[in-house]
Amino acid sequence: MSRRLAVFALALLLLEACGATGGDELLPAPFMADFDVQGHRGARGLRPESTLPAFETALDLGVTTLELDLHFSADGQIVVWHDPVIGPDKCRLRDNAPSTIPDPDDPRTHAKRAVAALTGDQLQWFQCDRNPNEGEFPEQLAKSTELAGDDFRVVTLVELFEFVESYRDSPIKSETQRATAATIRFNVETKRRPDDPAPIGEGFDGVEAGPFELALLEVVSRFDLEERIVVQSFDHRSLWAVHSASPDLTLAALTPDRFADLETLAGNGASIWSPRYTSLRSQDIEDAHRLGLQVIPWTVNDPASFADMISMGVDGIITDRPDLLLAHLGR
């Protein structure tokens, strides 16, 4: 049994002895003190994903980590966006956009809307305030927030870091909220794909850090965030390249399911394993912990699944609904 699971079991026994357990009871505070609550794409279940209002909402709630995805623009800027192409399901043109900016609502412009084909300045003209799945995210609202307002643009990583700094210093935020921003961690995903190099097609050889990774490391260094950054990826070549260039950065290996060579991941420098939560077993978590790997699954959104994952001993959860997870933890 893993140490975390053993502590959890003991805490439950103590609660039962006091007659305090029940289906909706909060978990014991000491057990949850270091539990990592990661807001997926900010807070995708509450605000349009990957936008400043989504990240502000996550900070307001008190997450411990902002999770986000990264692409590489045509002019070499690190862009905070999940998809390789700016699509009409999430984005539209802002008012008064130049005629040279490809319209997401025009299917003929698909290739021109690839993030890798657009400059940082061009990306500013997309307003990404549409909900692509109202059935899954009925509470996602394109509603303005205190600092970001209705700024639903595609932003660069530099702009996000600057926004978090402004949040940290903002007099309109509470002392607790400012403290959250001052210590917030960033889990940044490089969106490389070993089967399709086109989305970030700058000549990555699969071994040495490419221009994308080097640009990412430069931005992290510029903001002095090395100790608060986790780099994650499904393309583990990108992780090992980052490790070669910056050995002290924390790495998280994403996998599409529970089947992973954990010894190889740990041996190559990963500190975190992030599998899809639906197939995860307690034994997998124990195996990972024995190798020194934390386990932070994706993407968990309902209280029953929160309880299942926590009872198995995970070290954190990536979620679209950090509000629900934080309530479940009693924070």
Image (cartoon, grey):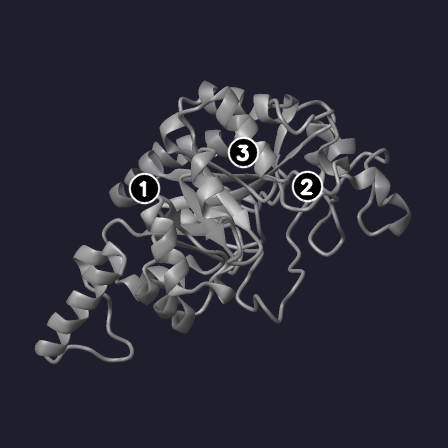
| Residue 149 x %, y % | 52, 45
| Label 2: which secondary element | loop
Label whose residue precedes the other's in the sequence (2 or 3): 2
Residue where numbered disc 3 is placed: 239
Eye-nearest disc, 1 or 3: 3
Residue where numbered disc 2 is placed: 193
Eye-nearest disc, 2 or 1: 2
Image check: 125 left or right of 12?
right
Of residues 98 and 198, the one nearer the viewer is 198
- The answer to whether residue 179 is above or below residue 61 is above
The residue lying at 33 percent from left, 59 percent from top is: 326
Give the residue type that dot 1 points to: Thr
Q: Are marks 2 and 1 in contact (CB under 8 Å)?
A: no
Tell me if mark 1 has few (under 14), some (14-19) or many (20+) residues whose alpha carbon lies within 10 angstroms of its own: many
Label whose residue precedes the other's in the sequence (1 or 3): 1
The residue lying at 32 percent from left, 36 percent from top is: 183
Can you say which quadrant of the picture contains the N terminus?
Answer: bottom left
- The answer to whether residue 45 is above or below residue 304 is above
Of residues 228 and 184, the one nearer the viewer is 228
Tell me if mark 3 has few (under 14), some (14-19) or many (20+) residues whose alpha carbon lies within 10 angstroms of its own: many
User: Splitting the image into 4 quarters, where does residue 154 fall?
Assistant: top right
| Label 1: which secondary element | helix
- The answer to whether residue 331 is above or below residue 98 is below
| Residue 214 x %, y % | 58, 21
Can you say which quadrant of the picture contains the C terminus?
Answer: bottom left
Residue where numbered disc 1 is placed: 180
Image check: 136 left or right of 88?
left
| Label 3: which secondary element | helix
Image check: 120 left or right of 284?
right
The residue lying at 18 percent from left, 71 percent from top is: 12
